Amino acid sequence: MHKTNSILMQAPKTAIFETAADLELWPKILPHYRYIRFLERGADRNLVMMAARRSGIPISWTSEQIIDRDKFEIHFHHLKALTKGMRVVWTFSDTADGVLVTISHDLRFRIPVLAPLVDPIVGDFFIHNVASKTLRCMKAYVEARVDKVTA
């Protein structure tokens, strides 16, 4: 399974990146996130339990987060739950129109023969939907902060 979500943001790349890297902030600015609990905390690596909602359906997973400030990338590796083994990469690319923020999700299903059945549910219904909301809400948050600074 490979799913990609992207959105163009009008804010400084560093501000967008640091907002995306700050998991403690997510439940405050992303209304579909129920909580993020830190199991281990570090400057560039965190182990977290993450929980969100998709249309009222609660979902949760455990993930390792790696923050690569040199490459402007944030990596997640899902360690538990249905998405165990999934690799998620956030990238931040400067364009003439703003910063293109992309979230890529890659998962090899544990039972490959079920992939055609599971992909639409896990990939489209849950992952694509939650990632789209995450990007839209984060865009609104970082752009509102830029507007306050420039006003």
Image (cartoon, rainbow, N blue to C red):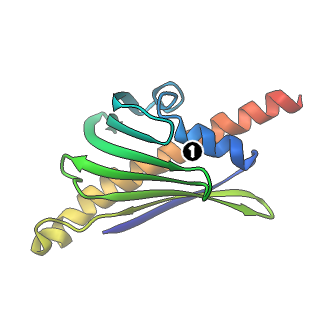
Q: Secondary structure at mark 1?
A: helix
What amino acid does circle 1 point to? Arg
Determine whether 27 is above or below 45 in the image: above
Where does the N terminus fall, quadrant-wise?
A: bottom left
Q: Residue visible at 19% across and 66% down?
A: 109
**Horizontal and vertical percent for residue 90?**
51, 55
Where does the C terminus fall, quadrant-wise?
A: top right
Q: Residue visible at 48% across and 28% down?
A: 24
**Horizontal and vertical percent for residue 70?**
62, 55
| Extreme residue toward the bottom, this view | 113
| Extreme residue toward the top, this view | 28
Residue 144: name its quadrant.
top right
| Extreme residue toward the right, this view | 151
Q: Is residue 14 left or right of residue 7?
A: right
Q: Residue visible at 83% across and 29% down?
A: 149
Crowding at dot 1, Cα within 10 Å, few <14 / some 14-19 / many 20+, comes out as some
Number of residue marks: 1
Q: Observer-nearest residue: 13 or 45?
A: 45
Q: For mark 1, what is the residue? A: 136
Determine whether 105 is above or below 26 in the image: below
**Horizontal and vertical percent for residue 46?**
40, 38
Determine whether 75 is above or below 59 in the image: below
**Horizontal and vertical percent for residue 150?**
88, 32
Q: Residue visible at 35% across and 45% down?
A: 64
Residue 140: name its quadrant.
top right
Q: Observer-nearest residue: 101 or 24?
A: 24
